[in-house]
Image (cartoon, helix red, strand yellow):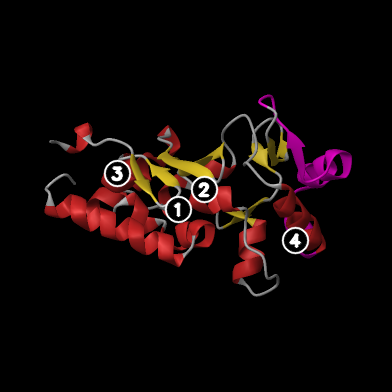
Amino acid sequence: MSSNELHILQVGNVLVSPDVFTEKFCCDLELCKGQCCVEGDAGAPVTLDEIGEMENVLDTVWEDLSASAQAVIDKQGVAYTDREGELVSSIVNGKDCVFTCYENGICLCALDRAYRNGKTKWPKPISCALYPIRVKSFGNNLFGINYNKWGVCKTARIKGKELNLPLYQFLKDPLIRRFGKEWYDELCEVADQLKEQGLI
């Protein structure tokens, strides 16, 4: 059986797409310039709790935001409901996340930068940290994760192949943050079994 014939696997209460094991991925900010924060037609998926966290740290990151982003937040807040009825972070001019900021020509997340610099205790929304993995809830505490292939991440796929770094390993910390260390260890055990069987 080839990797293309792998089926959805269940790890704990999470249905895992084969791409999570087979796709090689590693962000290359020097080349992509953080395009995932400025491309697209909607903001990043967020929860009500995350909206509260974003509002709590807003004063800390306010000066890092563009005047346009500040105006959007003043008008509609840090998040809105998109066309599909999902809560997403607010965006500027139909694409840029309001929390984007720039450093040496590279687009960064103001929320994440403040956290890394020790100014806040909350990082960016989990949907951003997990990208290009997307999480879907099926109800009854059952979730699914799959790889969202996007053209702007071409350089990440090239770098991932060069490093032979599978997606689930690249996103180790965000996956643990979302599903827990015990779950991630089980995911790695499944990956090891697939390797032993020559499936990945």
* Category of crowding for the residue at label 1, using alpha-carbon neighbours closer than 10 angstroms: few (below 14), some (14–19), many (at least 20): some
- Residue 184, can we see it? yes
User: Can residue 134 be seen in this snapshot?
Assistant: no
Residue toward you, 20 or 95: 20
- Which numbered disc flags the more N-terminal residue, 2 or 1? 1
Check the image and report above or below for 179 versus 31: below
**How dense is the environment of label 4, judged by Cα within 10 Å: few (below 14), some, or many (20 and up)?**
many
**Foreground: disc 4 or disc 1:** 4
Q: Nearer the viewer, residue 134 or 71?
A: 134
Pointer 1: what residue?
Answer: 29
Position of 7 with respect to 72 (left or right) is left
Mark seen at residue 34: 2
Q: Position of residue 82 (x, y in %)?
A: 70, 30
Q: Give the residue number, with chain letter if any, for mark 4.
A: 61
Q: Where 181 sits versus 194, above or below? A: below
Q: CA distance from mark 2 to mark 1?
A: 6 Å
**Could you say which is closer to the camera, residue 68 or residue 165?**
165
Q: Amino acid at mark 1?
A: Leu
In contact (CB < 8 Å): disc 3 and disc 1: no
Name, please, the residue furthest toward the top: 83
Q: CA distance from mark 3 to mark 1?
A: 19 Å
In the rendered structure, which amino acid carries the disc numbered 4?
Answer: Val
Check residue 23 in the rendering and tell me which mark sits there, or answer none.
3
Q: Position of residue 69 (x, y in %)?
A: 76, 44
**Mark 4 or mark 3, whichever is nearer to me:** 3
Q: Are marks 2 and 1 in contact (CB under 8 Å)?
A: yes
Total labels drawn:
4
Identify the mark nearer the N-term, 4 or 2.
2
Range of residues picked out in magenta: 60-84
